[in-house]
Image (tube, grey):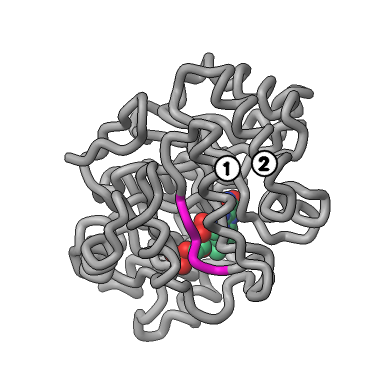
Amino acid sequence: MVFLAMGFPIQLQDPIMLAPMAGYTDSPFRRIACSFGAGMVFTELISADGIVRHNKKTLDLLTFTPYERPLGIQIFGNDPAIMQEAACQLLSLKPDCIDINCGCCAPKVCNNGKGAGLLKDIDLLYKIACAVVSSIHVPVSAKIRLGLSQGTKNYMEVVHALEEAGVAFITVHGRTRDQYYSGKADWEAITHIARTAKVPIVGNGDITSYDHALTKLQSSGCSAVMIGRAALGNPWIFCGKTPSWEEKRETIALHYKLMIEHYGSYGVILMRKHIVHYLKGFPGASKIRQGIISCDRIEEIFKILDSSFD
Ligand SMILES: Cc1cc2nc3c(=O)[nH]c(=O)nc-3n(C[C@H](O)[C@H](O)[C@H](O)COP(=O)(O)O)c2cc1C
Protein backbone atom coordinates (compact mmCIF):
# COMPACT_ATOMS: atom_id res chain seq x y z
CA MET A 1 0.00 0.00 0.00
CA VAL A 2 1.38 3.40 -0.97
CA PHE A 3 0.08 6.74 0.19
CA LEU A 4 0.66 9.31 -2.49
CA ALA A 5 0.16 13.04 -2.23
CA MET A 6 0.61 15.68 0.42
CA GLY A 7 -2.35 16.88 2.39
CA PHE A 8 -5.00 14.55 1.00
CA PRO A 9 -3.36 11.14 0.64
CA ILE A 10 -4.42 8.92 -2.24
CA GLN A 11 -4.27 5.27 -1.28
CA LEU A 12 -2.66 3.16 -3.99
CA GLN A 13 -2.80 -0.65 -3.83
CA ASP A 14 0.15 -0.70 -6.16
CA PRO A 15 2.70 1.98 -7.14
CA ILE A 16 2.45 1.29 -10.88
CA MET A 17 0.02 3.55 -12.72
CA LEU A 18 -1.48 3.68 -16.19
CA ALA A 19 -0.38 6.86 -18.02
CA PRO A 20 -2.96 9.11 -19.66
CA MET A 21 -3.00 8.42 -23.42
CA ALA A 22 -5.35 10.30 -25.72
CA GLY A 23 -7.47 7.94 -27.78
CA TYR A 24 -6.55 4.89 -25.65
CA THR A 25 -7.08 5.32 -21.93
CA ASP A 26 -10.85 5.57 -22.03
CA SER A 27 -13.17 3.95 -19.53
CA PRO A 28 -13.01 0.42 -21.05
CA PHE A 29 -9.21 0.32 -21.15
CA ARG A 30 -8.91 1.86 -17.69
CA ARG A 31 -11.19 -0.86 -16.31
CA ILE A 32 -9.05 -3.54 -17.90
CA ALA A 33 -5.84 -1.95 -16.57
CA CYS A 34 -7.33 -1.76 -13.06
CA SER A 35 -8.45 -5.38 -13.22
CA PHE A 36 -4.81 -6.39 -13.82
CA GLY A 37 -3.52 -4.26 -10.96
CA ALA A 38 -2.85 -0.71 -12.21
CA GLY A 39 -2.50 1.30 -9.02
CA MET A 40 -4.08 4.43 -10.46
CA VAL A 41 -5.48 5.46 -13.83
CA PHE A 42 -6.01 8.78 -15.61
CA THR A 43 -8.31 10.13 -18.26
CA GLU A 44 -6.69 11.47 -21.37
CA LEU A 45 -6.11 15.22 -21.45
CA ILE A 46 -9.47 17.02 -21.41
CA SER A 47 -9.97 20.63 -22.45
CA ALA A 48 -10.86 22.98 -19.59
CA ASP A 49 -12.55 25.27 -22.14
CA GLY A 50 -14.67 22.34 -23.34
CA ILE A 51 -15.69 21.45 -19.78
CA VAL A 52 -16.71 25.01 -18.98
CA ARG A 53 -18.66 25.33 -22.26
CA HIS A 54 -20.34 21.93 -21.66
CA ASN A 55 -19.11 20.71 -25.02
CA LYS A 56 -20.74 17.31 -25.57
CA LYS A 57 -17.62 15.58 -26.96
CA THR A 58 -15.57 16.88 -24.04
CA LEU A 59 -18.12 15.76 -21.46
CA ASP A 60 -18.23 12.27 -23.04
CA LEU A 61 -14.54 11.89 -22.17
CA LEU A 62 -15.45 12.28 -18.51
CA THR A 63 -17.53 9.11 -18.31
CA PHE A 64 -16.22 6.51 -15.90
CA THR A 65 -17.37 3.64 -13.69
CA PRO A 66 -16.61 2.66 -10.08
CA TYR A 67 -14.11 0.06 -11.38
CA GLU A 68 -11.56 2.72 -12.40
CA ARG A 69 -10.27 3.97 -9.09
CA PRO A 70 -8.23 5.80 -8.00
CA LEU A 71 -8.94 7.98 -11.04
CA GLY A 72 -7.22 11.21 -12.00
CA ILE A 73 -9.00 13.53 -14.42
CA GLN A 74 -6.42 15.36 -16.49
CA ILE A 75 -7.27 18.86 -17.71
CA PHE A 76 -5.41 21.26 -19.95
CA GLY A 77 -5.67 24.97 -20.61
CA ASN A 78 -3.82 28.26 -20.25
CA ASP A 79 -6.32 30.46 -18.40
CA PRO A 80 -6.27 30.27 -14.58
CA ALA A 81 -9.95 31.27 -14.23
CA ILE A 82 -11.11 28.69 -16.77
CA MET A 83 -8.92 25.96 -15.29
CA GLN A 84 -10.34 26.82 -11.86
CA GLU A 85 -13.92 26.78 -13.12
CA ALA A 86 -13.37 23.47 -14.91
CA ALA A 87 -11.88 21.91 -11.78
CA CYS A 88 -14.84 23.10 -9.69
CA GLN A 89 -17.29 21.61 -12.20
CA LEU A 90 -15.46 18.28 -12.04
CA LEU A 91 -15.93 17.99 -8.29
CA SER A 92 -19.43 16.60 -8.68
CA LEU A 93 -17.86 13.55 -10.39
CA LYS A 94 -15.78 12.88 -7.27
CA PRO A 95 -12.41 12.31 -8.96
CA ASP A 96 -9.57 11.09 -6.74
CA CYS A 97 -7.30 13.74 -8.22
CA ILE A 98 -7.26 16.49 -10.82
CA ASP A 99 -4.12 16.50 -12.91
CA ILE A 100 -2.85 19.54 -14.79
CA ASN A 101 -1.32 18.66 -18.15
CA CYS A 102 2.02 20.45 -18.58
CA GLY A 103 3.52 17.94 -20.96
CA CYS A 104 1.42 17.60 -24.10
CA CYS A 105 3.70 18.25 -27.07
CA ALA A 106 1.03 18.30 -29.84
CA PRO A 107 1.47 21.60 -31.73
CA LYS A 108 -2.22 22.55 -31.52
CA VAL A 109 -2.00 22.33 -27.70
CA CYS A 110 1.58 23.41 -27.03
CA ASN A 111 1.72 26.31 -29.51
CA ASN A 112 -1.25 27.90 -27.73
CA GLY A 113 0.71 27.94 -24.48
CA LYS A 114 -1.19 24.91 -23.14
CA GLY A 115 0.21 21.49 -22.22
CA ALA A 116 4.02 21.60 -22.46
CA GLY A 117 3.60 25.22 -23.63
CA LEU A 118 3.10 26.09 -19.94
CA LEU A 119 6.72 25.14 -19.23
CA LYS A 120 7.92 28.34 -20.88
CA ASP A 121 5.75 30.56 -18.69
CA ILE A 122 6.35 29.47 -15.12
CA ASP A 123 4.47 32.48 -13.68
CA LEU A 124 1.35 31.46 -15.59
CA LEU A 125 1.82 27.81 -14.64
CA TYR A 126 2.09 28.88 -10.98
CA LYS A 127 -1.08 30.98 -11.25
CA ILE A 128 -2.98 28.10 -12.84
CA ALA A 129 -1.82 25.61 -10.20
CA CYS A 130 -2.69 28.07 -7.37
CA ALA A 131 -6.12 28.75 -8.88
CA VAL A 132 -6.96 25.05 -9.14
CA VAL A 133 -5.44 24.00 -5.79
CA SER A 134 -7.16 26.78 -3.85
CA SER A 135 -10.61 26.07 -5.23
CA ILE A 136 -11.06 22.35 -4.68
CA HIS A 137 -10.71 19.87 -1.84
CA VAL A 138 -9.24 16.97 -3.83
CA PRO A 139 -5.54 16.48 -4.57
CA VAL A 140 -4.23 18.40 -7.57
CA SER A 141 -1.25 16.97 -9.42
CA ALA A 142 0.69 18.02 -12.51
CA LYS A 143 2.35 16.03 -15.27
CA ILE A 144 5.41 17.69 -16.72
CA ARG A 145 8.25 17.15 -19.17
CA LEU A 146 11.85 18.18 -18.42
CA GLY A 147 11.54 21.41 -20.41
CA LEU A 148 10.80 22.59 -23.90
CA SER A 149 14.16 21.61 -25.40
CA GLN A 150 17.55 20.23 -24.42
CA GLY A 151 18.84 23.78 -24.13
CA THR A 152 15.99 25.06 -21.98
CA LYS A 153 15.48 22.30 -19.42
CA ASN A 154 13.90 24.10 -16.47
CA TYR A 155 12.37 21.22 -14.54
CA MET A 156 13.69 22.24 -11.13
CA GLU A 157 12.09 25.70 -11.43
CA VAL A 158 8.87 24.13 -12.67
CA VAL A 159 8.87 21.63 -9.79
CA HIS A 160 9.52 24.40 -7.23
CA ALA A 161 6.70 26.55 -8.64
CA LEU A 162 4.29 23.62 -8.51
CA GLU A 163 5.36 22.72 -4.97
CA GLU A 164 4.88 26.33 -3.92
CA ALA A 165 1.41 26.31 -5.45
CA GLY A 166 0.54 23.31 -3.29
CA VAL A 167 0.26 20.42 -5.74
CA ALA A 168 -0.01 17.00 -4.14
CA PHE A 169 2.38 15.14 -6.44
CA ILE A 170 4.15 15.62 -9.77
CA THR A 171 4.55 13.12 -12.60
CA VAL A 172 7.71 13.60 -14.62
CA HIS A 173 8.01 12.27 -18.16
CA GLY A 174 11.78 12.27 -18.65
CA ARG A 175 11.83 13.94 -22.06
CA THR A 176 11.71 17.47 -23.37
CA ARG A 177 8.85 18.78 -25.50
CA ASP A 178 10.93 18.84 -28.67
CA GLN A 179 11.84 15.18 -28.24
CA TYR A 180 8.19 14.13 -28.54
CA TYR A 181 8.67 10.37 -27.97
CA SER A 182 12.12 10.00 -29.51
CA GLY A 183 15.42 9.38 -27.77
CA LYS A 184 15.49 7.91 -24.29
CA ALA A 185 13.69 9.10 -21.17
CA ASP A 186 16.26 10.67 -18.83
CA TRP A 187 15.92 8.70 -15.61
CA GLU A 188 18.93 10.49 -14.11
CA ALA A 189 16.94 13.71 -14.20
CA ILE A 190 13.85 11.94 -12.81
CA THR A 191 15.99 10.47 -10.00
CA HIS A 192 17.43 13.90 -9.21
CA ILE A 193 13.95 15.38 -9.00
CA ALA A 194 12.64 12.49 -6.86
CA ARG A 195 15.55 12.86 -4.43
CA THR A 196 15.21 16.62 -4.02
CA ALA A 197 11.52 17.47 -4.41
CA LYS A 198 9.31 18.13 -1.41
CA VAL A 199 6.32 16.38 -2.96
CA PRO A 200 6.05 12.77 -4.12
CA ILE A 201 7.31 12.20 -7.66
CA VAL A 202 5.90 9.72 -10.16
CA GLY A 203 8.50 8.69 -12.75
CA ASN A 204 7.50 8.06 -16.34
CA GLY A 205 9.17 7.11 -19.58
CA ASP A 206 10.17 3.95 -21.48
CA ILE A 207 9.21 1.37 -18.83
CA THR A 208 8.82 -1.92 -20.69
CA SER A 209 7.85 -4.55 -18.11
CA TYR A 210 6.66 -5.10 -14.55
CA ASP A 211 10.20 -5.98 -13.37
CA HIS A 212 11.55 -2.90 -15.14
CA ALA A 213 8.94 -0.82 -13.31
CA LEU A 214 10.04 -2.25 -9.95
CA THR A 215 13.69 -1.60 -10.77
CA LYS A 216 12.99 2.00 -11.75
CA LEU A 217 10.87 2.51 -8.66
CA GLN A 218 13.68 1.35 -6.44
CA SER A 219 16.61 3.00 -8.21
CA SER A 220 14.96 6.39 -8.71
CA GLY A 221 13.40 6.94 -5.31
CA CYS A 222 10.09 7.82 -7.00
CA SER A 223 6.93 7.21 -4.98
CA ALA A 224 5.30 5.54 -7.98
CA VAL A 225 5.93 4.97 -11.66
CA MET A 226 3.65 5.34 -14.64
CA ILE A 227 3.48 3.16 -17.76
CA GLY A 228 2.11 4.33 -21.09
CA ARG A 229 2.89 2.67 -24.43
CA ALA A 230 4.04 -0.64 -23.00
CA ALA A 231 0.58 -1.15 -21.44
CA LEU A 232 -1.15 -0.99 -24.83
CA GLY A 233 -2.25 -4.51 -25.70
CA ASN A 234 -0.45 -5.64 -22.55
CA PRO A 235 -2.42 -4.79 -19.40
CA TRP A 236 -0.68 -7.79 -17.76
CA ILE A 237 2.29 -5.45 -17.36
CA PHE A 238 0.62 -4.25 -14.16
CA CYS A 239 0.86 -7.69 -12.51
CA GLY A 240 3.97 -9.10 -14.16
CA LYS A 241 2.19 -12.04 -15.75
CA THR A 242 2.91 -13.47 -19.19
CA PRO A 243 -0.54 -14.39 -20.51
CA SER A 244 -1.25 -17.49 -22.52
CA TRP A 245 -2.95 -16.87 -25.88
CA GLU A 246 -6.15 -18.24 -24.32
CA GLU A 247 -5.97 -15.52 -21.64
CA LYS A 248 -5.23 -12.93 -24.30
CA ARG A 249 -8.24 -14.00 -26.31
CA GLU A 250 -10.45 -13.71 -23.21
CA THR A 251 -9.17 -10.21 -22.51
CA ILE A 252 -9.63 -9.14 -26.13
CA ALA A 253 -13.21 -10.46 -25.99
CA LEU A 254 -13.87 -8.59 -22.75
CA HIS A 255 -12.31 -5.43 -24.18
CA TYR A 256 -14.62 -5.67 -27.23
CA LYS A 257 -17.62 -6.17 -24.96
CA LEU A 258 -16.74 -3.10 -22.86
CA MET A 259 -16.08 -1.00 -25.98
CA ILE A 260 -19.47 -1.89 -27.45
CA GLU A 261 -21.22 -1.20 -24.14
CA HIS A 262 -19.47 2.15 -23.94
CA TYR A 263 -19.55 3.38 -27.56
CA GLY A 264 -22.23 1.23 -29.22
CA SER A 265 -21.30 -0.36 -32.54
CA TYR A 266 -18.62 2.34 -33.14
CA GLY A 267 -16.68 0.58 -30.37
CA VAL A 268 -15.79 -2.13 -32.90
CA ILE A 269 -14.03 0.44 -35.08
CA LEU A 270 -12.33 2.08 -32.10
CA MET A 271 -11.10 -1.31 -30.95
CA ARG A 272 -9.00 -1.73 -34.11
CA LYS A 273 -6.11 0.28 -32.73
CA HIS A 274 -6.07 -1.87 -29.57
CA ILE A 275 -6.13 -5.09 -31.60
CA VAL A 276 -2.94 -4.04 -33.37
CA HIS A 277 -1.25 -3.92 -29.97
CA TYR A 278 -2.78 -7.13 -28.56
CA LEU A 279 -1.60 -9.11 -31.58
CA LYS A 280 1.98 -7.85 -31.50
CA GLY A 281 4.30 -10.83 -31.65
CA PHE A 282 1.55 -13.36 -32.44
CA PRO A 283 2.44 -15.64 -35.38
CA GLY A 284 0.49 -14.50 -38.41
CA ALA A 285 -0.59 -11.31 -36.60
CA SER A 286 -0.73 -9.15 -39.72
CA LYS A 287 -3.07 -11.56 -41.51
CA ILE A 288 -5.37 -11.81 -38.48
CA ARG A 289 -5.28 -8.04 -38.12
CA GLN A 290 -6.21 -7.54 -41.74
CA GLY A 291 -9.10 -9.97 -41.34
CA ILE A 292 -10.36 -8.28 -38.19
CA ILE A 293 -9.92 -4.75 -39.45
CA SER A 294 -12.15 -5.35 -42.43
CA CYS A 295 -15.04 -6.69 -40.26
CA ASP A 296 -17.48 -4.57 -38.40
CA ARG A 297 -19.61 -7.37 -36.98
CA ILE A 298 -18.48 -8.71 -33.66
CA GLU A 299 -19.48 -12.31 -34.50
CA GLU A 300 -17.15 -12.31 -37.51
CA ILE A 301 -14.32 -10.90 -35.42
CA PHE A 302 -14.68 -13.66 -32.83
CA LYS A 303 -14.80 -16.25 -35.58
CA ILE A 304 -11.44 -15.03 -36.89
CA LEU A 305 -9.97 -14.84 -33.41
CA ASP A 306 -11.22 -18.29 -32.46
CA SER A 307 -9.88 -19.95 -35.57
CA SER A 308 -6.53 -18.13 -35.18
CA PHE A 309 -6.06 -18.92 -31.52
CA ASP A 310 -7.12 -22.60 -31.75
C1 LIG B 1 -0.93 7.89 -28.00
C2 LIG B 1 -0.46 8.69 -26.81
C3 LIG B 1 -1.31 9.61 -26.23
C4 LIG B 1 -0.89 10.36 -25.11
N1 LIG B 1 -1.78 11.23 -24.52
C5 LIG B 1 -1.39 11.85 -23.37
C6 LIG B 1 -2.34 12.64 -22.65
O1 LIG B 1 -3.53 12.76 -23.02
N2 LIG B 1 -1.90 13.27 -21.52
C7 LIG B 1 -0.61 13.14 -21.07
O2 LIG B 1 -0.25 13.71 -20.04
N3 LIG B 1 0.29 12.39 -21.73
C8 LIG B 1 -0.08 11.73 -22.84
N4 LIG B 1 0.81 10.91 -23.47
C9 LIG B 1 2.15 10.70 -22.87
C10 LIG B 1 2.14 9.49 -21.91
O3 LIG B 1 1.28 9.72 -20.82
C11 LIG B 1 3.56 9.20 -21.39
O4 LIG B 1 4.02 10.32 -20.70
C12 LIG B 1 4.55 8.88 -22.51
O5 LIG B 1 3.99 7.99 -23.45
C13 LIG B 1 5.84 8.28 -21.94
O6 LIG B 1 5.57 7.10 -21.24
P1 LIG B 1 5.84 5.64 -21.90
O7 LIG B 1 7.25 5.63 -22.38
O8 LIG B 1 5.57 4.67 -20.79
O9 LIG B 1 4.87 5.52 -23.05
C14 LIG B 1 0.42 10.17 -24.58
C15 LIG B 1 1.27 9.25 -25.20
C16 LIG B 1 0.85 8.50 -26.27
C17 LIG B 1 1.80 7.48 -26.88
In the image, what residue occupies the spot 23% across and 46% down?
14
In the image, what residue occupies the spot 49% across and 44% down?
259
User: Which residue does the numbered mark 1 point to in the structure image?
Assistant: 161
The answer to whether residue 144 is above or below residue 79 is below
SS state under label 1: helix
In the image, what residue occupies the spot 68% across and 33% down?
127
Residue type, numbered disc 1 = Ala
- The magenta span reads 171-175
* In front of the other: 254 or 122: 122
**Rendered-image quarter of ligand 1:** bottom right
Q: Where is residue 219 in the image (x, y as percent from the top left)?
A: 24, 67
For mark 1, does the 10 Å Cα neighbourhood hold few (<14), some (14 to 19), or many (20 or more) residues? Answer: some
The answer to whether residue 192 is above or below residue 224 is below
Q: Is residue 191 left or right of residue 35?
A: right
SS state under label 2: helix
What label sits on residue 120 in the rendered view?
Answer: none
Question: Could you tell me if residue 159 is visible in this image?
Answer: yes
Whether ligand 1 has any atom under 8 Å from the Cβ at mark 1 is answered as no
Q: In which quarter of the image is the C terminus?
A: bottom left
User: Which residue does the numbered mark 2 point to in the structure image?
Assistant: 125
Q: In this view, does 136 lie to the left or right of 256?
A: right
Q: Is residue 47 left or right of residue 248?
A: right
In the image, what residue occupies the spot 58% across and 17% down?
135
